[in-house]
């Protein structure tokens, strides 16, 4: 009977993790935001969500309705401001070398999403990959008989920039 309604304002959690199970052996993860869940009304709201780890930050919002029913629906938005993906992978112990040393050093994205337990639609997708901009949408529905739709537009890309540096041997399988 308890905890039918709960709210948290100004949540701020920092986790310092170390060990073999942690990518890169060591990390600090910071999470902050506001959250409210009302099981009497079947609604949830997460706002001002901010998750930071490995030099990357994700910011977003989420609203859910119908938590008490089979017609639950959710929607929200997510933004990952520009960051250096090579540095992030390095910190995670997954170094990556590319033919162009500047490749993967300016990556970010933003999108809106909506869905239900059996569907997801991502709209207003914009991915910034160095000097490339990718815009579009995709959706997934009906896990029993998947219906996947994707519409993506790429303004320009030099794929050679993302290949391994010249002279590097390919990893043996």
Image (tube, helix red, strand yellow):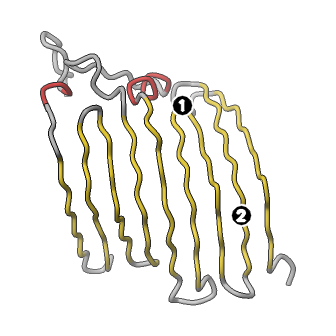
What residue is shown with label 1?
54
Question: Is the C-beta separation of discs 2 and 1 under 8 Å?
Answer: no
Q: Residue at x 16, y 20 (%)?
A: 170
The residue carrying pointer 2 sits among few (fewer than 14), some (14 to 19) or many (20 or more) residues within 10 Å by Cα, namely: many
State the residue lying farthest toward the right.
2
Q: Residue at x 29, y 32 (%)?
A: 130
**Left or right placement of residue 1 versus residue 137 in this view:** right
Location of residue 103 by image quarter: top left
What residue is shown with label 2?
35
Question: In the drawing, what numbered circle is on residue 172?
Answer: none
Q: Position of residue 100 (x, y in %)?
A: 22, 18
**Left or right placement of residue 76 versus residue 16 in this view:** left
- Mark 2 → mark 1, Cα distance in angstroms: 24 Å
For residue 165, above or below residue 103? above
Q: Position of residue 30 (x, y in %)?
A: 67, 40
Location of residue 96 by image quarter: top left
For marks 2 and 1 on the same chain, the one whose residue lies earlier in the sequence: 2
For residue 131, above or below residue 79? above
Observer-nearest residue: 38 or 48? 48
Quadrant (top left/top right/bottom left/bottom right) for the C terminus = top left
Quadrant (top left/top right/bottom left/bottom right) for the N terminus = bottom right
**Left or right placement of residue 81 versus residue 95 in this view:** right
The residue carrying pointer 1 sits among few (fewer than 14), some (14 to 19) or many (20 or more) residues within 10 Å by Cα, namely: some
Label 2 secondary element:
strand
Total residue callouts: 2
For residue 108, above or below residue 159? below
Q: Residue at x 87, y 79 (%)?
A: 2
């Amino acid at each position: 009977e308890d905890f039918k309604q709960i709210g948290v304002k100004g949540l701020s959690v920092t986790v310092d993790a170390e060990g073999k199970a942690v990518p890169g052996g060591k990390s600090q993860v910071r999470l902050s935001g506001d959250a409210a869940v009302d099981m009497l009304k079947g609604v949830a709201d997460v706002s001002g969500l901010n998750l930071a780890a490995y030099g990357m930050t994700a910011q977003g919002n989420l609203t859910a309705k119908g938590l008490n029913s089979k017609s639950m629906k959710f929607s929200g938005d997510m933004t990952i401001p520009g960051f250096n993906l090579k540095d992030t992978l390095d910190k995670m112990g997954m170094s990556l070398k590319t033919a162009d040393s500047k490749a993967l050093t300016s990556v970010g994205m933003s999108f809106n999403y909506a869905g239900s337990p059996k569907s997801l639609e991502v709209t207003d997708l914009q991915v910034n990959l160095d000097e490339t901009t990718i815009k579009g949408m995709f959706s997934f529905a009906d896990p029993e008989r998947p219906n996947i739709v994707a519409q993506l537009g790429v303004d320009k890309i030099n794929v050679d920039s993302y290949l391994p540096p010249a002279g590097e041997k390919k990893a043996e399988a």
